[in-house]
Image (tube, rainbow, N blue to C red):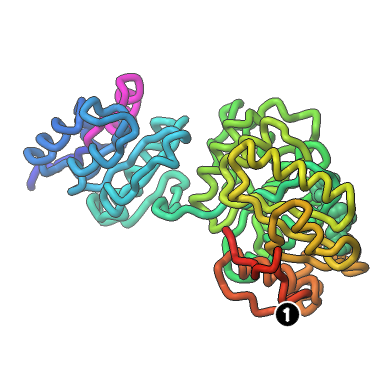
Amino acid sequence: MSPVVRPAVAILLPDAEAEPVALELHAGGFDPIFVRHGRELAETLALRKEIVLAVIDPEADPDNAPGAYGAARPAVRTIPALVVIDEDSLDDLETAAGHPDDEYVIRPYSAESIRWRIEAMCIRSAAVDDGSGPVLQGEIDQADWGRRGKVIAVFNPKGGVGKTMVATNLSAALVSKGQRVLLLDADTVTGHVPSSLGMEGVPTVVDAWRDEMEGGPILTFDQMASVHTSGLKVLPLTSSPMATELLEPQRVAGAIAVARRNVDYVVIDAHPSYSPLNRAMLGKSDTILVPVTPDMPAVRALVQLREVAADLGMLERIVLVVNRAASGISVEDIERSANIPAYAQIRSAGMLMVQANNEGRTLFEIGPREKITQDFSTLADRLLGVAPAAEAIRPSMRLFGRPLTARA
Ligand SMILES: Nc1ncnc2c1ncn2[C@@H]1O[C@H](COP(=O)(O)OP(=O)(O)OP(=O)(O)O)[C@@H](O)[C@H]1O
Ligand SMILES: [Mg+2]
């Protein structure tokens, strides 16, 4: 009988992390092999063919420039790696540089979770075959890390302009077009997305992070979210304005950056203010969708918002949506006053909206053929880059004599 060779896993991690990970992997039947830098990893791989996987932190490699993931990865391109990173490094990650089966784990993590992931990666790559078939001991994050969903913040520091209504029904429109959408109720003061969708008592981010502090699992926003009957994933930050101390702005923004890897769209319904939390979330957003109603206070607030957005370098990401269009000040006058072209218009829904709120359903569920529903469909098509099919309220909309061009 030939001796059983334990599959080996190369470990390139900061010292404090390497040891507990090695102990866990050893307990899991792997042979852990420590390496200190990228060159040593390449040399070891050339010599030791029993190494099937690597656990690496590109930033722990002294051969590597800080953040330059691409420089270290070619050394281990021959085998898949479980790459350990900080949330902050996520956006800089050059996924093309590694092996196609690379997977990622974000700090903080437990050594045990690394073992589960390594076992699952082995099973997937058929590196370990004991004949008993795949036995996964933990929940495996199957995210496709090469992809990056879009983040749309629905924002206006003015209250009552339709942010929540637009965020909810735009999300529903995107879901109806086959998109995976996470709707984040980030109104920590008066948020009511779940109740307007008939979802009572849904778990919040504060619940999950409290649980995590008490030894519970580390979950992504996508995993924390509850699924509405429409298929929309819904996650409130908190259920109480008094319980927000855990919602540290950078942590929330980092979690949004992680969540976007698991869905096509993260739609954020924000509280009306320039709070540090809002500014952190706006910083992570590809599009800042600003609903405005056709009345003077709202237009005045829009003029101010434009100035603030310019100061914050966010003007290019602003997309103006005129809500309750055709019920007051004309769209041309709003555009002219704020010097921002209208990207889309949503008409007034009348009783349909009241019915939707009462029934806890979206416009797409109760009135798919209604005109306001078509307005949302047109808005979603435009964001998706599909030519709008529905009739516009004002088809030949022009700004200062020029036809409007699409942005975002
Ligand atoms: N186009 C519309 N047709 C009918 N009702 C609407 C429309 N837009 C908004 N509403 C209603 O107006 C009210 C205010 O809208 P909403 O709550 O979405 O505003 P908001 O900007 O999120 O407010 P807040 O700043 O308080 O969060 C709600 O009752 C909503 O259902
Ligand atoms: Mg709101």
Whole-percent x, y for residue 39 in the image: 14, 32
Ligand 1 under 8 Å from disc 1 Cβ: no
Q: Nearer the viewer, residue 297 or 374?
A: 297
Q: Which residue is mark 1?
A: 391
164 left or right of 289 in image: right
Q: Residue furthest top?
A: 16
> On the rendered image, what quadrant is the C terminus found in?
bottom right
Placement of 39 over or under 146, stated as above or below: above
Q: Residue at x 30, y 20 (%)?
A: 15
Residue 15 part of the magenta-drawn span: yes
Q: Which residues are magenta?
A: 10-26
Whole-percent x, y for residue 110 in the image: 43, 31
105 left or right of 312 in image: left
Residue 384 appears in which quarter of the rendering?
Answer: bottom right
Q: Residue at x 84, y 49 (%)?
A: 298
Whole-percent x, y for residue 46 in the image: 8, 41
Can residue 258 be seen here? The reply is yes
Residue 310 appears in which quarter of the rendering?
Answer: top right
Whole-percent x, y for residue 3 in the image: 10, 42
Q: Nearer the viewer, residue 131 or 335?
A: 335
Q: How many marks are shown on the rendered structure?
A: 1
Q: Residue at x 56, y 42 (%)?
A: 284
Q: Residue furthest front?
A: 401
User: SS class of the residue under badge 1?
Assistant: loop
Q: Amino acid at mark 1?
A: Glu
Can residue 22 be seen here? The reply is no
Q: Main secondary structure of the magenta part?
A: helix
